[in-house]
Image (cartoon, grey):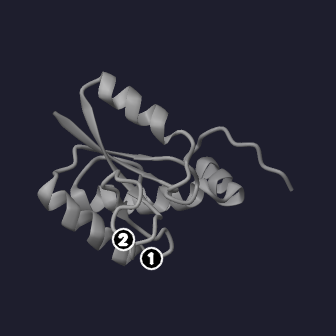
C-alpha cells in the first residue's frame, strides 16, 4: 500500500475528503498537522504534530515518523504548509516542488519574477 504524507492545518475542512479519496485508491494518508504536540493524539488521527514556522523541528518529527511508516508521496493543503512539505519531500528523497519554488508560491511578486526569469508567461505590474 502506498503511503502519502498530507500536511495541513488541524482544522482543514477538506481533510476528510482527502482521506476518503485516498482510501478509495488504496492509499494510506499520514497526516502532519499543526495540532498541539502536548496532547496525546486528541483527534485519534495519528497525525505527526508539526509547527509550520519550526521547519527543523517539524522535519525531525516527520522523519522520525517516516522511519516507522515510510512515505511514498507528499501533499500540502494550503499556503502555510507548502514550504514544510517541500523540505520534507527533499529530506525523504521524494520528488516534489523545490523549496525555493514553494517559498515563491506564497509571494506573488517573487513568483512572477521567477516565472519571467525562466522565460514563462507572467503578468508583471509596475
Q: Is residue 59 left or right of residue 75?
A: left
Find numbered disc 2 in the image and state the secondary structure of the residue it sits on.
helix
Which quadrant, please, contains the C terminus? Answer: bottom right
> How many residues crowd mark 2 within 10 Å: few (<14), some (14–19), many (20+)?
many
Q: Could you tell me which residue is drawn at 36 percent across and 71 percent down?
A: 58
Image location (x, y in percent) of residue 116: 64, 48
> How many residues crowd mark 1 within 10 Å: few (<14), some (14–19), many (20+)?
few
Q: Could you tell me which residue is drawn at 67 percent across and 51 percent down?
A: 112
Image location (x, y in percent) of residue 101: 50, 55
- Residue position for label 2: 58
Report how far apart the C-alphas of labels 2 and 1 lie in the structure.
Answer: 6 Å
Q: Nearer the viewer, residue 75 or 105?
A: 75
Image location (x, y in percent) of residue 96: 36, 47
Choose top left, top right, bottom left or bottom right for residue 121. top right
- The numbered dot on residue 54 is 1
Find numbered disc 1 in the image and state the secondary structure of the residue it sits on.
loop
Q: Could you tell me which residue is drawn at 16 percent across and 52 percent down?
A: 69
Q: Could you tell me which residue is drawn at 51 percent across and 74 percent down?
A: 53
Query: Contact, CB < 8 Å: mark 2 with mark 1?
Result: yes
Choose top left, top right, bottom left or bottom right for residue 91. bottom left
Amino acid at each position: 500500500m502506498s503511503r502519502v504524507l498530507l500536511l495541513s492545518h488541524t482544522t482543514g475542512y477538506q481533510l476528510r475528503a482527502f482521506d476518503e479519496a485516498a482510501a478509495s485508491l488504496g492509499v494510506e494518508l499520514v497526516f502532519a498537522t499543526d495540532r498541539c504536540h502536548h496532547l496525546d493524539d486528541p483527534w485519534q488521527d495519528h497525525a505527526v504534530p508539526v509547527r509550520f514556522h519550526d521547519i527543523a523541528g517539524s522535519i525531525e518529527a516527520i522523519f522520525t515518523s517516516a522511519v516507522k511508516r515510510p512515505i511514498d508521496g507528499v501533499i500540502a493543503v494550503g499556503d502555510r504548509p507548502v514550504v514544510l512539505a517541500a523540505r520534507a519531500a527533499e529530506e525523504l528523497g521524494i520528488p516534489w516542488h523545490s523549496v525555493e519554488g514553494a517559498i515563491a508560491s506564497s509571494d506573488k511578486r517573487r513568483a512572477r519574477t521567477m516565472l519571467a526569469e525562466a522565460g514563462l508567461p507572467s503578468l508583471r505590474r509596475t
